[in-house]
Amino acid sequence: MIRNVFRATTRIPDAVRVVTIGVIAALWPGRDEPDISDWLDAQSPARQTGLQALVIFVLAIMAILFAQFGWIGLGLYFGIVLWLIR
């Protein structure tokens, strides 16, 4: 049981990185995922962590705000997230 939990938690930073790259690539015209990944690798570890935390924080705050509008708001939120990540 503890091995499964450990395996799941070791994949979280990779998932956060992929989401961060996807969101930044969607918002930065003319850049694709490999370019953003290279750019993110060139940043200091502290800046990488800060950018990843900022993206996850913004997505979480958006989810809370959109949830105030019920099912329609959550549907709109998921639509925006899918459009960003595509």
Image (cartoon, helix red, strand yellow):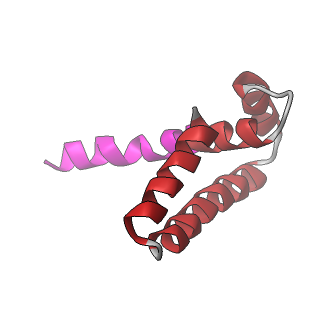
Left or right placement of residue 20 versus residue 16 in this view:
right
61 vs 42, nearest the viewer: 61
- Vertical position of residue 48 compared to residue 53: above or below: above
> Outermost residue, left direction?
1
Residue 67: percent from left, percent from top: 45, 70
* Quadrant containing the C terminus in the rendered view: top right
Is 9 one of the magenta-colored residues? yes
Q: Residue at x 57, y 42 (%)?
A: 19
Name which quarter of the figure residue 62 lies in: bottom right
Tell me if residue 62 comes above or below residue 41 in the rendering. Answer: below
Seen in the image, is 79 located left or right of residue 38?
Answer: left
Instruction: Tell me the chief SS of the magenta region.
Output: helix
| Residue 32 lies within the magenta run | no
Residue at left 19%, top 50%?
A: 2
The answer to whether any part of residue 17 appears in the image is no
Residue 58, percent from left and from top: 63, 63
